[in-house]
Amino acid sequence: MRVTQEADYAIRMCLILDSIGEKTGAATLADLACITPKIALKVLRKLHEGGFVRSYKGVQGGYELVRSGDEVKVLDIIELIDGPVRISKCLECDHDCSRNPCKTDCKMHIAFGAINKKLIDNLGKITVRMLHDKSVSDSDIADIINSKK
């Protein structure tokens, strides 16, 4: 599984919106995220349709997060842009395995399932705020990921 560039941009723009804390224009967001305005608008449209950002039209228009950055999970942004997180096609319900039709008896499927669950759980623990809040250290994030909660 690889997080696409588009999902990375979406995370970046949510992070920027949370750090600014107020309505921000698409051109400014594009500049701060180091992407083209065209790509920024495409990603912002998806974030808007997914309920992550609110958009305002007009000269004083712009975008803002609908929820606090403490509530916006990295997992949710990735899944909005890229779809469900899966490290292997064999974890898809409709995927027919050519090696073992009964996935429950396949050790590879079981191992991938356990790894995928940990990945989803950990991405679900990371919020946009954690990624820019200077009071949250790298070791704080590692502790959060390693906690059993």
Image (spheres, grey):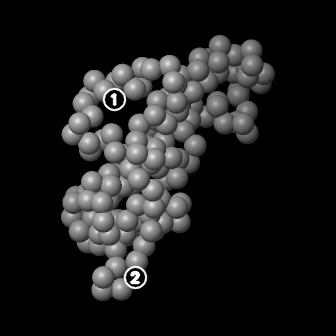
- At label 1, counting other C-alpha atoms closer than 10 Å, the crowd grade (few under 14, some 14-19, many 20 or more) is some
SS at circle 1 = helix
Q: Are marks 2 and 1 in contact (CB under 8 Å)?
A: no
Residue at horizontal 40%, vertical 45%?
70
Mark 2 to mark 1 CA distance (whole Å): 36 Å
Residue at horizontal 33%, vertical 29%?
141
In screen coordinates, is 92 left or right of 5?
right
The mark nearer the N terminus, 2 or 1, is 2
Q: In the picture shown, does residue 91 fall above or below 33?
A: above
Tell which residue pokes out farthest to the right in this image. 102
Which residue lies under the disc numbered 2?
57
Residue nearest the observer in this picture, 94 or 75: 75
Q: Quadrant of residue 137?
A: top left
Check disc 1 and give the amino acid type.
Ile
Q: In the picture shown, does residue 33 fall above or below 57?
A: above
Which residue lies under the disc numbered 1?
141
For residue 43, say whether it is visible. Answer: no
In screen coordinates, is 75 left or right of 93?
left
Q: Quadrant of residue 26?
A: bottom left
How far from the left and from the top, in percent, is residue 73?
46, 44
- At label 2, counting other C-alpha atoms closer than 10 Å, the crowd grade (few under 14, some 14-19, many 20 or more) is few
Residue at horizontal 34%, vertical 45%?
129
How far from the left and from the top, in percent, is residue 145?
41, 25
Check disc 2 and give the amino acid type.
Lys
